[in-house]
Amino acid sequence: MARSILLADDSPTIRKIVELTFADSDLRVESAETGREALENIESLHPDLVLADVVMPDPTGYELCRAVKGSDRPVPVILLAGTFEPFDARQAEECGADAHIVKPFESGALRDKVEELLGAAEAEREAASEPLPAPPELEHVMEELSESAEEGEAVAEAVSEAVEEA
């Protein structure tokens, strides 16, 4: 299944650059001009990652990030900030952003960061779906239960034989 990125940025130039950056990859880029448009489409798009402009109108990238991270299906979020735009690291941390990149950016750096975060998210999902091994301090409990089960089977067999003989 193809992976997808939801890009929310009010700059047509940035949207085009991001689309071109991932054009030859297995990542599909879905673009939104506003935070509101991104929020309206996020449920139907089910993106694997969100790129959000911090100074985008209604809501800002920080607010969009907070909504994504608070949803039933949180995904990695990279905040985009212009060189001359204010970036609030504290607010980025509070909203749960996974990373931020300053515009203009190198396409390779963006690709690398996206792949890194997607890989980490996939590994986290796989780890969450695997059963946890029993802690070493509980191994003796498992052994005792196994021995008890074997003893129980022996007792049941003896009782069964006694009943047959009677």
Image (cartoon, rainbow, N blue to C red):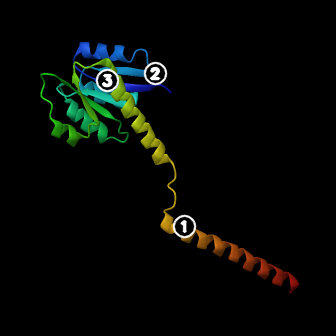
Nearer to the camera, 47 or 76: 76
Dot 3 crowding, Cα within 10 Å, few <14, some 14–19, many 20+: some
Q: Residue at x 52, y 57 (%)?
A: 133
The answer to whether residue 137 is above or below residue 61 is: below
Q: Is residue 102 visible?
A: yes
The residue labelled by disc 3 is 110
Q: Is residue 48 visible?
A: no
Q: Residue at x 43, y 15 (%)?
A: 24
Q: Secondary structure at mark 2?
A: loop
Q: Earlier in the sequence, mark 1 or mark 2?
A: 2
Mark 3 vs mark 2: give the one in front. 3
Instruction: Give the quadrant of residue 34.
Output: top left
Residue 161 rendering spot, x and y as whole percentages: 83, 80
Mark 1 vs mark 2: give the one in front. 1
- The amino acid type found where label 1 is placed reads Glu
Q: Earlier in the sequence, mark 3 or mark 2?
A: 2
Please state if 154 lies on the left or on the right of 59 as rendered. Answer: right
Residue 116 rendering spot, x and y as whole percentages: 38, 32
Nearer to the camera, 135 or 125: 135
Q: Residue at x 24, y 21 (%)?
A: 9
Q: Earlier in the sequence, mark 3 or mark 1?
A: 3
Furthest residue toward bottom: 166
Nearer to the camera, 132 or 58: 132
Residue 120 rendering spot, x and y as whole percentages: 40, 38
In the image, which disc is placed on residue 26? 2
Q: Quadrant of the C terminus?
A: bottom right
In the image, which disc is placed on residue 56? none
Dot 1 crowding, Cα within 10 Å, few <14, some 14–19, many 20+: few
Q: How many marks?
A: 3
In the image, which disc is placed on residue 139? 1
Q: Secondary structure at mark 3?
A: helix
- The amino acid type found where label 3 is placed reads Leu
